[in-house]
Image (tube, helix red, strand yellow):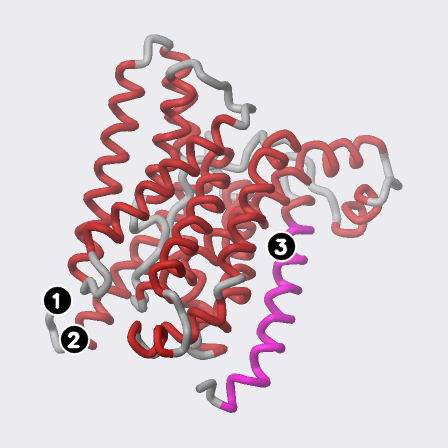
Amino acid sequence: MVKPEFRGRRFVVLTGLAALVTLLALGSLGVGPVRITPFAVIEALFGSGSEVHQTIVREIRLPRAILGLAVGAILGLSGAALQGLLRNPLASPSLFGAPQSAAFGAVLTIALGWADVRSYALPVAGIVMAFVSVFVLLGIAGRNAGLLLLILSGLAISSLAGAATALVMNLSSNPFAALEIAFWLLGSLEDRSFRHVMLALPFIIAGAVVLLSQRSAFRALSLGEETAQSLGVDVGRLRLLVITGVALGVGGAVSVTGTIGFIGLVAPHLVRPLIGHDPARLLIPSALAGAALLLAADIAVRIIPSTTDIKVGVLTSIIGVPFFLYLIARERRALGGGLG
């Protein structure tokens, strides 16, 4: 049951998050070596204003903003879906190795010369490997895995994917390709074009549709698997659909932005105190929160003084790791000092 105080609050939270995402998107279009005011950004978007501003906003920064919004949204949505599926607040795509595995699939495709960074083979390879990683995790951990088992299984899959990626780079005969892959794996929205948007967006949208279509099943599952099955939920089918949705969305996103971690973990936790713990009600707010987080991080890397460009994946990890440790400590206190 949804507490009465959360029912009316959800609309306010959604409206506020949508407004925040809109403002951050406008900020993303205006921030850079050439600063553009919000009014000039709006003019450039609608074809008025100076030609220089139109070129900068519509051809250089708009694809970056669209990807920031879409990738952040699917990461937040995937995190909320996995937390609902496993009924564990520490579940997220990055902790289970999905982004790392997707990155390995894309890197392997590039290193073997099967495709370049603008080919549709990249998201397909990323999706396949993300699907494999989440499927293997659920197979190893089982249906009712505890916190420790989930963390260890995810760590093993992430480490294996990272080692495999390093091996591919090490064996690459082209040093320039290896260097490009290394920078790409750090996670970035820099120098992305509408070609990258068209590569990732269909898979991200497909993944989001699959995950959102199961929101009523998440609510039933929160009561337990046996109760959910008595209510007509096919838990096995739900698990497969969630894996497919996460693999489609995360695989498509990672294939054009590289590995961007912890958005899927942090976003649901930011909105849960505002709208409650109902996993069905968390999906869309988590997507909006994820979009806001990634857009804000991408703006931050452009305004932080540095001699070289900071990759957005580095910044999200710096923020996300302490948050993850805080969540582990909180879970440990809730379990009376134990981890399992």
Q: Nearer the viewer, residue 116 or 189?
A: 116
Q: Secondary structure at mark 1?
A: loop
Residue displayed at 56% across by 46% down: 68
Check the image and report above or below for 48 versus 107.
below
Q: Nearer the viewer, residue 335 or 299?
A: 335
User: Is 250 colored magenta in this rendering?
Assistant: no
Cα distance between the residues tagged 3 and 1 = 40 Å
Upstream in sequence: badge 3 or badge 1: 3
Residue at numbered disc 1: 340
Is residue 299 visible in the rendered image? The answer is no
Q: Nearer the viewer, residue 184 or 286?
A: 286
- Please tell me the numbered disc located at residue 24: 3
Residue 169 image offset from top left, x and y in percent: 31, 20
Start-end of magenta stretch: 4-27
Specify the amino acid type for callout 2.
Answer: Leu
Residue displayed at 50% across by 19% down: 116
Residue displayed at 56% across by 61% down: 288
Residue 339 image offset from top left, x and y in percent: 13, 66
Specify the amino acid type for callout 1.
Answer: Gly
Residue at the limit of the structure toward the right, as seen here:
48
Residue 199 lies left or right of residue 124; in this view the side is: right
Are the residues flagged by discs 2 and 1 in contact, CB closer than 8 Å? yes
